[in-house]
Image: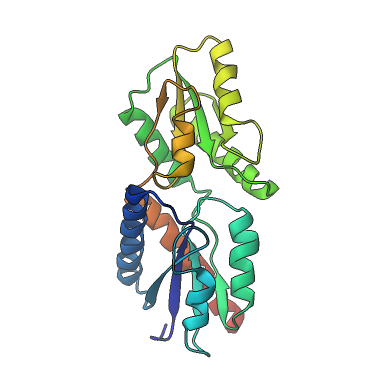
Amino acid sequence: MNESMHVVVCAHGTDDLDGRRAVDCLRAEVADLSHRRGIDARIHEAYVDVQEPALDDVLGSLPEGERAVVLPLLLSTGHHTQVDIRRAVDSRPGTLAAAPIGPDRRLAFALAERLAQAGLDDGDRVVLASAGTRVARGTEEVIQMAAWLGEELGRPVTAAFGAAAEPHVRDAVRHHRAQGGRRVFLASYLLAPGYFHNLLTRAGADVVTSPLLPSRLVAECAVDRLAEVLHLASHEDS
């Protein structure tokens, strides 16, 4: 790869300062791991909401004729990947979009670690709590992650959502309460602190785990998505 390759690392954006720092650290880890794997690229910061610089503006500022890849720091398919990122990528020739970070079995391991740190015990019920999307594929991806987490934990895990999809996190918590579980744990399937994690803390669970970041595994998953799209592009060019 030559020096004209640009990687636009695109996050959702948040007003939460801790969330911003967590995403900044993830972007730095992505840059470090990319370099270690021989991906010679300039890393750019961008967002689809809340923060600046906006993805459209970053792509518009890149020199014409130089290749670029948008790398979403998003856990699953949704409106931002299917609409915002796709529209921005299609507006600039020579630009590709990598897949979102998840689903990935390694994220189930990271989620299980968070649950262990939070004191998960036998008899506790587990809900995998995602932000939610109206995009069916994104919902299916979260359900897949819940299944993988269940395999990791050796117990059933329910997928639930903070908005846009069913079941809602509050309803999933109420359901488990009715089943007589000792405690209900929400496994936060979110990257960083912010609006949706705050919603989880008000959903009535006994314990809400910390978001996934910081986690080197998340950066490894993201860089794998980057490597995959570059590999595919190289085959299409050959």
Q: Is residue 69 visible?
A: yes
Q: How is the image coloured?
A: rainbow
Residue at (68%, 49%) from the top-left corner? 135
23 or 94: which is nearer to us? 23
Q: Residue furthest top?
A: 180
Q: Is residue 215 visible?
A: no
66 or 51: which is nearer to us? 51
- Residue 122 percent coordinates (x, y): 41, 16
209 or 113: which is nearer to us? 209
The quadrant of the picture occupied by the N terminus is bottom left
The quadrant of the picture occupied by the C terminus is bottom right
Q: Is residue 152 left or right of residue 32?
A: right
195 or 184: which is nearer to us? 195
Residue at (42%, 86%) from the top-left corner? 4
- Residue 62 percent coordinates (x, y): 47, 83
Residue at (33%, 23%) from the top-left corner? 119
> Which image quarter: residue 176?
top right
- Residue 180 percent coordinates (x, y): 53, 9
Whether residue 128 is situated above or below residue 72 in the rendered picture: above
Q: How many marks?
A: 0
Residue at (38%, 77%) from the top-left corner? 41
Whether residue 121 is situated above or below residue 228 in the rendered picture: above
Whether residue 190 is situated above or below residue 207 in the rendered picture: below
- Residue 12 percent coordinates (x, y): 49, 56
Q: Is residue 192 left or right of residue 204?
A: left
